[in-house]
Image (spheres, rainbow, N blue to C red):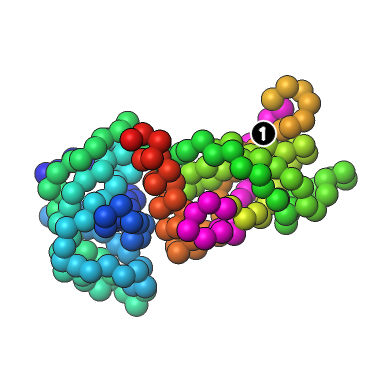
């Protein structure tokens, strides 16, 4: 079953527990392979649920047969992936995003131009989060390219995250100001916990 159109990343789940995030590629025969770090505990061959993020086909949750693990390099393995069934398809072209309103303690690690009046530590409130970034409100208009660190609670463990401001906006001409950010320096283990949390929250809200 060839349902992928333009896909470069996916997530492997076992009984709704995220095992790891992987990269997707095809070999010369156009068969699908998944590339994953060696330090993730994947038992293969076996049947797994794989969520593919396809920029054309959308988000595809599939039942897949994963074959024998092959060594790619000292740090990466690969595994052949055969899609047996599409369990769910959503027309999404980005990571899963959930609405999440929670208080944040933001630590400003970098502010371009060092403008006056912005303290090192500020309070904010998240509005939504995905595995790729976060949107939050705070009483200070942080310049584009600012970097903040904060802890996100609610997952299996508190996550220390760093985010770079991509856009800012004044919602009513006065505080609070909105900030759209992308996560940076995200370690694979942290990303796996974050994706698992978002996946669970999204499914709980739909069922």
Q: Position of residue 70 (x, y in %)?
A: 21, 71
Residue 192 can be seen in this image: yes
Q: Which residues are magenta?
A: 153-170
Place residue 57 in its image quadrant.
top left
**Which quadrant holds the N terminus?**
top left
Residue under label 1: 178
Q: Is residue 97 left or right of residue 18?
A: right
> Residue at 33% of width from left, 44% of height from top?
53
Residue at x-position 77% and y-position 37%:
139
- From the top left corner, tell me how far across and down residue 38 is, in percent: 34, 72
| Residue 168 in sight in this render | no
Taking the spot 72% from the left edge, 27% from the top edge, the residue there is 170
The image position of residue 177, as x and y in percent, is 72, 33
Q: Is residue 125 left or right of residue 40?
A: right
Q: Secondary structure at mark 1?
A: strand
Closer to the camera, 117 or 123?
A: 123
In which quadrant of the rendered view does residue 158 lie?
bottom right
Q: Is residue 196 above or below residue 129?
A: below
Residue 156 belongs to the span the image colors magenta: yes
Residue lying farthest to the top in this orientation: 172
Q: Is residue 158 magenta?
A: yes
**In the picture shown, does residue 12 fall above or below 91?**
below
Q: Is residue 205 left or right of residue 134?
A: left
Q: Quadrant of residue 42?
A: bottom left
Main secondary structure of the magenta stretch: strand
The C terminus: image quadrant:
top left
């Amino acid at each position: 079953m060839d349902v992928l159109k333009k896909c470069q990343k996916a997530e492997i789940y076992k009984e709704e527990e995220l095992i790891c995030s992987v990269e997707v590629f095809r070999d010369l025969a156009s068969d699908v392979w998944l590339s994953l770090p060696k330090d993730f505990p994947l038992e293969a061959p076996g049947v797994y649920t794989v969520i593919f993020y396809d920029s054309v086909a959308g988000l595809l949750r599939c039942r897949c047969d994963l074959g024998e693990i092959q060594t790619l390099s000292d740090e990466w393995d690969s595994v052949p992936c055969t899609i047996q069934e599409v369990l769910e398809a959503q027309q999404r072209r980005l990571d899963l995003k959930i609405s999440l309103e929670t208080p944040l303690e933001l630590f400003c690690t970098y502010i371009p131009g060092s403008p006056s009046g912005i303290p090192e530590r500020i309070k904010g409130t998240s509005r939504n989060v995905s595995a790729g970034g976060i949107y939050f409100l705070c009483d200070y208009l942080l310049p584009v390219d600012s970097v903040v660190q904060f802890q996100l609670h609610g997952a299996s463990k508190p996550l220390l995250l760093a985010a770079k401001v991509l856009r800012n906006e004044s919602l009513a001409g006065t505080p609070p100001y909105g900030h759209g950010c992308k996560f940076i320096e995200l370690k694979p283990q942290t990303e796996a916990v974050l994706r698992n949390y978002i996946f669970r929250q999204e499914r709980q809200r739909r069922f």
